[in-house]
Structures are given as structure tokens and as C-alpha cells.
Image (cartoon, rainbow, N blue to C red):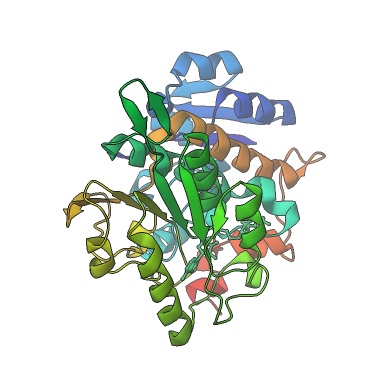
Amino acid sequence: MKIAILKEEAGETRCAAIPETVKKFIALGADIMIESGAGEGASIPDSDFIDAGATVGKRAAVLDGAEVILTISGPDPQTLAGAKPAALLVGSLDPLRRRQEILAYAGAGLEALAMEWMPRITRAQSMDVLSSQSNLAGYKAVVDAAAAFGRAFPMMMTAAGTISPAKAFIMGVGVAGLQAIATAKRLGAQVSATDVRSATKEQIQSLGAKPIFVENVAGIEGEGAGGYATEMSEEYQKAQAELVSGHIAKQDIVITTALIPGRPAPRLISDGQVATMRAGSVIVDLAAEAGGNVEGTIAGERVVRHGVTIIGASNLARTLAADASALFARNLYNFLSAFWDKDRGQVVLPDDDEIVKAVRLTQGGKLVNERLGAA
Ligand code: NAD
């Protein structure tokens, strides 16, 4: 089976393979073709891929006869000529926002598989790109906040006097939020956190942070469907706004990560609440791409409101390209190797498999995923 790894489009620093996964695919019996320069953004020179056993070349040669194309964020459909009919295109394809491209993949006869639609089941945990990339984003959000903050995080007792520790508040305690709590703790901040799912209370405490929860209106008991939150009632939103108003004015650093699948990000902080924070405070909004948790957030930009810096974080995993590539590439390997048919020496995706049904977008020239409106 011939697997092609392409150089990603401008702006994408990550690479869908690393030498380790190249070796593992070769051990399964695959041939690996890598477009020259594909690893550049992730500090992987072509020579490392060649040493791992891959063939490195120009795009046309890499695609010629490819049965699988691995990608991080989905190539331009116009640039994929040469792949075998019904070749698998596997990556984070952003199906809802890139519908035209997904239709074009179908038109080109490709079977597109969206890694971000991996179901949240135990078997798929090692294939979950949302988790692997969010974890890194949670870490980087805190590091970026620390870099933009004109004060120190830890308490310091010096001959010139004492510096008090920074107070950090993490809103939304999923994968990114948990890593943000852990990172802020390691840097020495006093950390508090909130979520709508009651199951997170214990997780917050186990990381040594203080849970701040709405008590008078019920949140989501336990994990919520598929581990995800839903939109909250007006009553809950009002109680949450009051809770945040009382807490946020005392915070130096706020990291927001709250997302609701398929919906705009919930608004958690108003401009009026930002105004109550001390000048020099920093907010990192990890939900910026989904509309933002903070009023005034602009995705990909840094704005100052009432003396508070609001960072509209956009795809932070890209700023940790080497680690992000390694985790993403392993997610891809774990996915394909789980469906590897040893006798046939290729990937076989059973139609009735829960994972296949969730991630498969196109087949036989058509959209085949319910979430894309297919019958
Ligand atoms: P997410 O990115 O969808 O959302 C981030 C967090 O924001 C969630 O914790 C959510 O509850 C919270 N949130 C939503 N609305 C909010 C609001 N109004 N106020 C405050 N917080 C709000 O979540 P995620 O990081 O993908 O993780 C969600 C859960 O799924 C976690 O429990 C995680 O451990 C679990 N998970 C399971 C698997 C698996 O089993 N394969 C994989 C990944 C995640």
C-alpha cells in the first residue's frame, strides 16, 4: 500500500508523519512517499525521512498511485491528481467549514476521512486528534499569557520585597483546560477553574486548583453526552455571569476554553467584566475561532480593552509544530494500523464500524456522512 504525505499549505507548520511513524508503517508493509520539504515547519529535514525508509520527491511523484494520503489540515483538491481511484484522504478536514473542498474530494473520487470526528470511545482515544492538539494548546495558552503578562507567576521573596503570586482562572475544563490548570500551577500561579460539567470539579481539585461553580442552578451532571457540554439555560447563564463578575475582578490571568460542538462558543466574559480587571491582566481566548468566549476577542489577534490584553488564540498547536506533528502523526498511525488487514497488506474500513461511520465523509463520489446532510 502506497501512502503519500504532502507538504501542507502555507500557514500550516505541522506534518502528518514523523520518522517514527514512517518506520512503523514500513514495518506493516507500506511504502511511504513524502513530498520534499513536508517536515520543514516541524524541524524534520527530508534526510530524516529518508533515513527512516521513506522516498522523498516532488508532489506529482509522491501522489502517483497513492492509495492513502495523510494530511494535517486538508490539501487543495485541485492539487491531488495522480492518486489512485478511491484513495483514502485522512486528516483534520474541517468538514463543516470546508464543505466545498469536501465535495471536491468526493468529485475527485477520494474517500475523505475526518479525524476530528473520531467518536469519544475508549478504542478511539489513541486516534483522537482533538485531544492531542488541545492538550498542547492548553499548555501554550498559559505560556503565551505568561509572556504577555508584565508580572511574574510565582511568589518570590527577594531582598527587595515580596512579589505575590499571579491569580489564574481557567474557564472550561476539558482537555485544554486541564492542561492549562496544570501548566499555570507548575509556573506557580494560584489557580481556580470552572465548568458546567459537574464531573470536572474533582479533576480541578486533583490538580490542586480551586473549583468555582454555580451552586444554585443545576449544571450538567457527570460528563454530558459524549463528554461534551450543551448550551445552558438562561437561568444558568445568568447565575454564571454573576459568579464570574464576583471572581474575575481579582484575577490576573484568565484562560477560556469553553466549546459546544456544532454551536458558537458560549459567551462567558462581557466587556463590562473585562473592565473590572486590573490593568495589565491577560486573557487568552482559546475559543476565538468559534466566535470567542470573551466579548471583544478577535481570532488570531491581540487586542487591549480597558488595559487588559485579550489574545484571540488561533490554532496554538501550530506553534508547537514538532510535538504537535508527533502526536498527530501517531494518531494517524493508530487509526490506520487498527484497520490494517495483514493478509491483504492494506487498510480495510468496514462499513458497519462505529469509528468508520463517524469519520467517513465521502465514498463513491458522494457525501456519505449524516453530519454533512447525506441521506
Ligand atoms: P470541549 O473542547 O468541547 O469544551 C471545553 C470545555 O468547555 C468542556 O469541559 C465543556 O464542558 C466546557 N464548557 C462548555 N460550555 C461551557 C460554559 N458555558 N461554561 C463553562 N464551561 C463550558 O471539551 P473537550 O476538551 O473536548 O473535553 C470534553 C470531555 O470529553 C472531557 O471530559 C474529556 O476528558 C472527554 N474526552 C473523552 C475522549 C475519549 O474518551 N476518547 C476524548 C477526548 C475528550
Which residue is drawn at the image coordinates 46% and 64% (left, top)?
259
Q: Relative to residue 271, is residue 71 depicted above or below?
A: above
Q: Nearer the viewer, residue 303 or 33?
A: 303
Q: Residue 244: horizontal and vertical position, in percent?
A: 40, 67
Q: Nearer the viewer, residue 11 or 315?
A: 315
Which residue is drawn at the image coordinates 72% and 29% (left, top)?
29
- Residue 87 makes an appearance in the image: no
- In the rendered image, which quarter is residue 98 located in? bottom left
Q: Residue 360: horizontal and vertical position, in percent?
A: 59, 61
Q: Relative to residue 319, is residue 253 depicted above or below?
A: below
* 65 sits left or right of 245 in the view: right
- Residue 131 makes an appearance in the image: yes
- In the rendered image, which quarter is residue 111 located in? bottom right
* 337 sits left or right of 262 in the view: right
- In the rendered image, which quarter is residue 7 located in? top left
Q: Relative to residue 283, is residue 157 depicted above or below?
A: above
Which residue is drawn at the image coordinates 44% and 54% (left, top)?
169
Q: Quadrant of ligand 1?
A: bottom right
Q: Residue 176: horizontal and vertical position, in percent?
A: 51, 50
Q: Relative to residue 192, is residue 328 depicted above or below?
A: above
